């Protein structure tokens, strides 16, 4: 060290180099005394040079590590060569204020006049340690996120080797992690797709950005057992120390595919049901009145093909005078406000001809109450009115000529027309009965789509929605079947029948009309009644006429409770049916006038309902009459002969 102490030119250069070093520099002799420090050592440890020079280097070592330090110095001086100190161990320095900090130390032997010294280059790695810890924590969080992901997650390197998978991957593909790690990702790809897969990976690395894999194509995965299943894949580039990796999120969409197929089949069945109705024009319009779908009944009645009318405004069905009066807009406004719009008015066909139509418009709303469109049902009643007039004229002529057989045929036709007329008057209620399940089916279809669109899709909710669609379609089909039985023209047919069952069917058909008029309907049907001989459709027509007359009478302003009671009982050799109401009652004198043809108290009635009903009952060998009901209202009775041998 004399050459250093003598401040030779070489010594000064050495000191300048040490002092300018970017790390803390401490030189010690074989006994461990500090010979020299630089400015950075002062700053790092918090001591001045005068406080350090001549002191034992152990003052810079934490107390818990000091006992071993002399032995380490001795080892270095036994074989003095440049090397790192404490390789493989965490080293710490001790500041003047008692604080410890992580360090790295490089040892270099220095030959001086006083012998071999050791020059220690000391680096404070506090910031690096913190960064490494943050990186480890970040990697740990990344692994935890990947592990907790609801989808299968597979990370691969540029060569296509599997670097990492999560538990969901093991469950979905049937392999353990050990079986997957380090293997080619192509082992998870069906053999028929493998040849293209490396090229697809290469394309992704040419432009590494988050995106779905195979957009517009059906993708499949391969399980360990050899089975294939449909999947969706999302690709994300991940930057790592080893380069860019690809993290694939893989979703097994087997359940969703099955649900979508079930939904498609359900919608197809629903469309077939609606499209198969030809007696009614059934179609939908959006909130602005633009036609969105069209059934065969609409094509038959209005003359437009589906491709001609979908996308057009429904106002084209209105007459010119109705369009001038803004009737199309007003009808939708009323339906949106009240939930329903009903009307009997003139409509236009494609060829410009007019027809008389019964129209019902129902507002359709989603599960949040927002208007999504309108369902429209239109029935052409032109022929019904014309037929009624023609049949009435024929009946008058046949009565005058007293041709009994001809009269019977006309009466049968009149009975059919009366049924059609009565059902026409019930268009709104019948449409409501049909619209309810149709609207329910549509809303449940929309709900199923939403449940399937969630991530992950809620298959249980979607399945429940599809089940409700099937139930709604069955309900609509049942209503249409009952209507068809009453509307179709059939010859007089005599059978032994259960009058109670026939009454129940009519009550079910008129249920919505009764509810609309706030009428409570009760049935008091006697048990064990014998069967009656007759035509079921004709007897049901009589019951239907009496029920509708009673409901309309009570709905026209009857005060107090509105109650309709339908009862049956044994009456000697007959079965008697009674229909009681709490309406305004019968005229004070000449009650029999109400059974005369064309006698009516309704502004739009033909006055044939009770006349035809009496003719039907008399043709069955029975009797129909009316009387006052106590304390108010009217009661109509009819008797028909019974099969006394069938009583239970």
Image: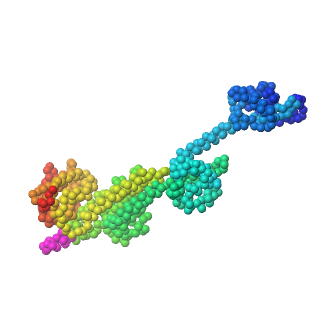
Q: Is residue 130 visible?
A: yes
Question: Residue 246's x, y, as percent?
Answer: 61, 52
User: Colour mode?
Assistant: rainbow
Q: Position of residue 17 (x, y in %)?
A: 83, 36
| Residue 465 on the magenta span | no
Residue at image coords 57%, 48%: 177
400 in magenta: yes
Q: Viewer-proximal residue, 332 or 394?
A: 394
Magenta range is 391-412
Task: Give the residue drawn at x 66%, y 37%.
Answer: 130
Quadrant in the rendering for residue 415: bottom left
Does residue 244 lie above or below 417 as drawn? Answer: above
| Position in image of residue 265 (x %, y %) | 41, 61
Q: Nearer the viewer, residue 35 or 355?
A: 35
Is residue 241 positioned above or below 52 on the image? below
Looking at the image, is 421 positioned above or below residue 18? below
């Amino acid at each position: 060290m004399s050459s250093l102490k003598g401040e030779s030119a070489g010594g000064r250069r050495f000191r300048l180099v040490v002092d300018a070093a970017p790390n803390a520099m401490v030189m010690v002799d074989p006994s461990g005394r500090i010979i020299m420090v630089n400015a950075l050592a002062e700053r790092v440890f918090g001591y001045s040079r005068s406080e350090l020079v001549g002191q034992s280097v152990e003052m810079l070592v934490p107390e818990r590590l000091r006992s071993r330090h002399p032995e380490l110095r001795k080892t270095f001086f036994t074989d003095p060569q440049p090397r790192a100190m404490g390789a493989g161990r965490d080293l710490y320095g001790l500041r003047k204020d008692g604080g410890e900090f992580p360090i790295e130390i490089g040892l270099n032997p220095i030959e001086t006049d006083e012998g071999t010294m050791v020059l220690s280059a000391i680096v404070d790695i506090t910031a690096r340690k913190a960064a490494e810890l943050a990186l480890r924590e970040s990697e740990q969080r990344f692994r935890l996120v990947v592990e907790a992901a609801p989808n299968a997650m597979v990370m691969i390197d540029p060569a296509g080797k599997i670097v990492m998978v999560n538990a969901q991957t093991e469950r979905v593909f049937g392999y353990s992690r050990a079986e997957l790690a380090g293997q080619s990702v192509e082992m998870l790809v069906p053999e028929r797709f493998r040849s293209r897969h490396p090229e697809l990976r290469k394309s992704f690395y040419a432009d590494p950005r988050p995106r779905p894999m195979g957009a517009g194509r059906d993708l499949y995965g391969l399980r360990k057992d050899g089975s294939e299943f449909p999947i969706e894949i999302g690709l994300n580039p991940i930057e790592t120390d080893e380069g860019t990796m690809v993290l694939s999120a893989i979703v097994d969409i087997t359940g969703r595919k099955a649900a979508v197929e079930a939904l498609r089949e359900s919608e197809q069945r629903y469309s077939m049901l609606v499209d198969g109705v030809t007696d009614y024009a059934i179609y939908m319009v959006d909130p602005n009145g633009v036609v969105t779908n069209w059934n065969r009944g609409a094509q038959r009645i209005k003359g437009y093909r589906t491709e001609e009318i979908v996308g057009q405004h429904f106002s084209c069905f209105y007459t010119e005078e109705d369009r001038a009066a803004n009737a199309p807009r007003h009808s939708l406004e009323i339906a949106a406000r009240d939930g329903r719009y009903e009307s009997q008015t003139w409509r236009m066909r494609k060829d410009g001809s007019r027809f008389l139509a019964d129209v019902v418009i129902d507002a359709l709303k989603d599960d949040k109450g927002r208007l999504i469109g309108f369902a429209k049902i239109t029935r052409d009643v032109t022929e019904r009115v014309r037929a009624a007039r023609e049949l009435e004229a024929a009946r008058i002529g046949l009565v005058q000529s007293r041709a009994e057989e001809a009269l019977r045929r006309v009466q049968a036709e009149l009975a059919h027309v009366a049924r059609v007329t009565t059902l026409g008057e019930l268009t709104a209620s019948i449409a409501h009965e049909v619209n309810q399940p149709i609207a329910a089916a549509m809303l449940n279809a929309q709900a199923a789509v939403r449940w399937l669109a969630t991530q992950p899709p809620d298959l249980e909710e979607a399945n429940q929605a599809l089940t409700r669609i099937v139930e709604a379609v069955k309900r609509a089909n049942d209503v249409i079947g009952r209507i068809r039985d009453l509307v179709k023209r059939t010859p007089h047919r005599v059978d032994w029948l259960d009058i109670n069952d026939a009454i129940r069917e009519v009550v079910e058909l008129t249920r919505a009309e009764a509810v609309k008029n706030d009428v409570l309907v009760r049935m008091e049907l006697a048990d064990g009644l014998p069967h009656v001989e007759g035509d079921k459709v004709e007897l049901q027509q009589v019951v239907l006429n009496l029920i509708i007359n009673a409901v309309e009478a009570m709905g026209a302003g009857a005060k107090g409770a509105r109650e309709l009671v339908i009862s049956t009982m044994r009456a000697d050799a007959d079965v008697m049916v009674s229909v009681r109401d709490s309406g305004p009652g019968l005229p004070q004198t000449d009650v029999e006038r109400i059974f005369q043809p064309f006698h009516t108290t309704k502004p739009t009635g033909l006055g044939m309902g009770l006349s035809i009903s009496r003719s039907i009952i008399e043709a069955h060998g029975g009797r129909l009459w009316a009387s006052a009901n106590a304390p108010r209202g009217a009661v109509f009775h009819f008797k028909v002969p019974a099969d006394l041998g069938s009583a239970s």
